[in-house]
């Protein structure tokens, strides 16, 4: 870490007090967030517009005439210069108007919002499962690192890491849906429309997401717990006569949790990406399915909106975690 | 070991289950235990997803497959054998010179929103074909105007005779629209058909409900849902796990056998309009030689192609027509696999070291075909480089529109697509005065025999010139679960009629 920033912050904290330092730290992080979003929007727009494939022809079909194609381009402003198109899009996006989908002819914002709700439920369930798996198993693997069962847990998590999400999905489908017939192989019912169906349909995709992420997260948990067990305060606790397990429970786990929470937030973006894949495997009408269709149709305005929403979402979660950690751990205010 | 069936809990559970079955059986007896259930619903898995509901401005067959004959109707329709039958028109007469079609309309038809159907609607709908930007409105370009003779009589006036006019009127282009509904075609569907449009959610599920006020026999099910699976295996899984009741236009060819072996399902294989063809760029310096094209045609083992692309289901073709066309002729014998003859043709043409680029749409059937073709052409000394292109976005632009390719392969699903060999601007670069003359004769024909004869002559000419290699006619695979009957067996490139489906429950 740079010493310069430490000294600036140190000087600042002398002048403005702890509250001021905190505010500056938070503001700086928000500034970085806004800047990142803007840069990302430029990159997304530029990348999508160099993508080969004509929007109008993809919409109108194989036998469209040149005149119809030209008319489509004019109607949708695709004949304007790229910078003009970008400005129109980004100002609209910032005010919540994401444009009208070329393929469905409905407001993009509405579709994205509907799909986002579905994806967030899926991602949330995935995180929950991942954490429920990772915390106990990771801790156990650390505590029992020199015993066969600890080694087995480590090996299992290694295997879990190596399995791609879609493969986990297909395996779960072939075992629990097609083979045993316990759960449906796909589909989606909104919780309000039928909670039982919702849970049954959510289980396999959430597991497909959560098992893989859980395996990864349990590696981090194991490492964090091992790290903590070597700390001085743990040695002190044990010297005072606490059994290792009790020492870990009372003092260790809370400390081990800090890096785990950080990693979980980083894993959030991986979960969102994983959800995109899982949705297409399980025919779930979330952002992932919407994105695949939009790409097929060259519905660029929709692709842009979806990608930007995911970018903003991931950055937002990182921002929140950053700010929360800054609030919790005073050390972070000056070391960055 | 204890027998689990002896366990008291197991016994109690079994009794309970029996009781439940008895109860439900009893309640069903009260309704209708034998025949189809009137209040039944059916859900059908499909592959091609409609982008929206407006097939007048959006390409792709998925939209009118779902809506035509179900929500929307035209003056005439195709039956499952591909014959033109009356629909909203009870009968029609064609003037001797073939330029005036006078339709007598039903007088008991209303749109779902209450708008009455009459000759003014016919005029409005058919004269609106100018507004269509998708799904080949040019096929009805011969329509000049529509005269309203009376509320129940309309005359369609053609600028020149077109024998195919009735056929195209039976498809999406002949759809009758209520004038007040055309601003909303992308998101609402108001027709005269046996089903009303209910909802289309997130490009995943399209729901239809029985139109209780339908002018003819009401639909066999109260509700029909079309569920779209982008992955063929996902659709098959849904069928196996009761996610859907049937799958139409199934693309999981490799799973047909396992469904056939499963008594819970019924598999039938019908016809489609699709011609899977390997177009050769006739403007390419060496491919402009018909001898070279014929050599390529003879070098390809079409049975092997069919096996690789569709697990052997479907019909091997040798020409541009399909078995359901009235002018179909089987050319597969004269174009059968003959590498020796192919080599000889190449030698006669004086072609050596031919390197071709094969632009392959990223669809499973196309990628499978490309591999076989690459091997087969390698056998006769033509080296083929494969280049995958995203379909439709990239392929339609580069290969089809810009005609920037040597070889490609694609499934042309639009019905009677043989007439595209009459278009010198089409992407295979085929321009034959002889063929065009036959096509013109066919259009001007006024009776079935003359028409078929002219079309057969056109096909002969096209096959001789070999602008492409006709590989196979795709199968229409229909897989239904128990109790589901009346599914449309053939894919005729028009609507997918769901009104005769019944479900025993």
Image (cartoon, rainbow, N blue to C red):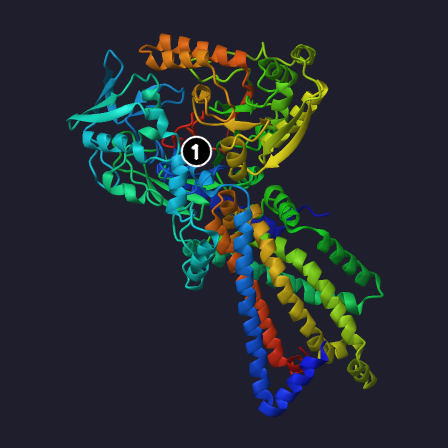
| One can see residue B23 in this view | no
> Residue at position x 65%, y 31% from top?
B386
Quarter of the figure with residue B264: top right
> Residue B451: x percent and y percent?
37, 11
Q: Is residue B52 left or right of residue A120?
A: left
> Residue at position x 67%, y 56% from top?
A212
The residue that mark 1 highlights is B61
Q: Is residue A299 left or right of residue A130?
A: left
Question: Does residue A142 sit above or below B260 in this rendering?
Answer: below
Residue that extends furthest to the right in the rendered view of this protein: A146
Quarter of the figure with residue B103: top left
Disc 1 crowd, CA 10 A, few/some/many (<14, 14-19, 20+): many
> Residue at position x 69%, y 81% from top?
A4
> Residue B503: x percent and y percent?
42, 34
Question: Does residue A307 sit above or below B297 in this rendering?
Answer: below
> Residue at position x 25%, y 12% from top?
B97
Instruction: Name the residue nearer the viewer: B316 or A15.
Output: A15
> Residue B131: x percent and y percent?
31, 36
Residue that extends furthest to the left in the rendered view of this protein: B150
């Amino acid at each position: 870490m740079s010493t310069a920033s430490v000294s600036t912050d140190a000087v600042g904290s002398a002048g403005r007090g702890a509250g001021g330092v905190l505010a500056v730290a938070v503001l700086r992080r928000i500034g970085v967030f806004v800047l990142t979003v803007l840069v990302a929007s430029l990159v997304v727009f530029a990348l999508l517009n160099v993508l080969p494939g004509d929007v109008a022809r993809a919409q109108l079909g194989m036998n469209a005439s040149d005149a119809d194609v030209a008319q489509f381009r004019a109607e949708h402003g695709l004949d304007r210069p790229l910078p003009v198109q970008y400005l129109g899009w980004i100002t609209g996006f910032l005010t919540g108007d994401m444009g009208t989908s070329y393929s469905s002819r409905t407001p993009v914002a509405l579709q994205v919002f509907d799909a986002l709700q579905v994806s967030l439920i899926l991602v949330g369930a995935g995180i929950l499962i991942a954490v429920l798996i990772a915390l106990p198993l990771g801790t156990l693997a650390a505590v029992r690192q020199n015993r066969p069962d600890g080694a087995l847990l480590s090996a299992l998590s290694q295997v879990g890491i190596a399995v791609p999400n879609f493969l986990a999905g297909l395996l779960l489908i072939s075992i629990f849906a097609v083979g045993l017939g316990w759960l449906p192989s796909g589909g989606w019912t909104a919780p309000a429309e039928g909670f039982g169906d919702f849970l049954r349909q959510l289980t396999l995709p959430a597991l497909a997401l959560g098992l893989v992420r859980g395996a990864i997260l349990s590696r981090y948990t194991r490492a964090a717990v091992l790290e903590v067990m070597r700390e001085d305060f743990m040695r002190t606790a044990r010297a005072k006569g606490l059994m290792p397990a009790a020492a870990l429970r009372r003092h260790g786990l809370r400390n081990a949790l800090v890096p785990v929470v950080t990693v979980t937030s980083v894993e959030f973006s991986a979960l969102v990406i994983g959800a995109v894949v899982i949705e297409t495997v399980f025919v779930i009408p979330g952002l992932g399915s919407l994105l695949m269709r939009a790409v097929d149709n060259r519905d660029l305005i929709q692709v842009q909106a979806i990608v930007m929403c995911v970018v903003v979402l991931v950055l937002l979660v990182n921002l929140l975690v950053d700010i929360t950690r800054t609030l919790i751990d005073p050390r972070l205010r000056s070391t960055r | 070991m204890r027998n689990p069936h002896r366990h008291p809990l197991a016994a109690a559970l079994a009794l309970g289950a029996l009781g439940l079955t008895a109860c439900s059986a009893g309640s069903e007896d009260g309704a209708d235990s034998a025949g189809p259930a009137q209040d039944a619903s059916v859900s059908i898995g499909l592959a091609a997803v409609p982008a929206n509901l407006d097939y007048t401005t959006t390409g792709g067959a998925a939209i009118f497959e779902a809506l035509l004959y179900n929500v929307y109707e035209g003056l005439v329709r195709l039956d499952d054998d591909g014959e033109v039958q009356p629909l909203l028109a009870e009968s029609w007469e064609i003037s001797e010179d073939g330029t005036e079609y006078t339709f007598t309309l039903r007088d008991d038809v209303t749109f779902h929103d209450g708008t009455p159907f009459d000759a003014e609607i016919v005029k409005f709908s058919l004269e609106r074909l100018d507004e269509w930007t998708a799904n080949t409105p040019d096929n009805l370009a011969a329509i000049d105007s529509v005269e309203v003779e009376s509320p129940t009589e309309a005359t369609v006036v053609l600028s020149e005779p077109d024998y195919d006019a009735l056929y195209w009127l039976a498809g999406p282009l002949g759809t009758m629209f209520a004038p007040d509904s055309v601003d909303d075609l992308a998101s609402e569907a108001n027709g005269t058909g046996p089903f009303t449009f209910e909802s289309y959610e997130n490009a995943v599920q399209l729901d239809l409900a029985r139109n209780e006020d339908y002018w003819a026999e009401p639909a066999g099910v109260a509700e029909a849902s079309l569920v779209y699976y982008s992955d063929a295996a996902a659709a098959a899984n849904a069928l196996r796990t009761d996610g859907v009741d049937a799958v139409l236009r199934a693309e999981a060819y490799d799973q047909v056998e396992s469904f056939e072996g499963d008594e819970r399902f019924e598999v039938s294989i019908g016809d489609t309009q699709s011609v899977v063809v390997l177009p050769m760029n006739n403007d390419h310096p060496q491919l402009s030689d018909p001898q070279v094209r014929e050599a390529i045609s003879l070098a390809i083992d079409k049975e092997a192609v069919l096996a690789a692309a569709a697990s052997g289901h479907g019909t091997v073709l040798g020409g541009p027509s399909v078995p359901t066309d009235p002018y179909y002729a089987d050319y597969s014998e004269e174009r059968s696999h003959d590498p020796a003859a192919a080599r000889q043709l190449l030698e006669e043409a004086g072609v050596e070291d031919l390197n071709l680029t094969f632009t392959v749409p990223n669809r499973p059937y196309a990628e499978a075909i490309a591999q076989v073709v690459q091997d087969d052409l390698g056998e006769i000394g033509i080296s083929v480089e494969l280049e995958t292109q995203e379909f439709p976005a990239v392929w339609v632009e580069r290969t089809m529109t810009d005609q920037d390719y040597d070889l490609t392969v694609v499934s042309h699903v639009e019905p009677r697509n043989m007439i595209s060999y009459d278009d010198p601007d089409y992407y295979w670069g085929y321009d034959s005065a002889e063929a065009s003359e036959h096509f013109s004769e066919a259009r001007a024909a006024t009776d079935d025999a003359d028409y078929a004869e002219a079309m057969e002559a056109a096909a002969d000419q096209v096959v001789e010139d070999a602008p492409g290699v006709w590989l196979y006619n795709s199968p229409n695979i229909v897989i239904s679960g128990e109790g589901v009957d009346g599914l449309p067996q053939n894919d005729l490139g028009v609507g997918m009629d769901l009104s005769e489906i019944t479900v025993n429950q």
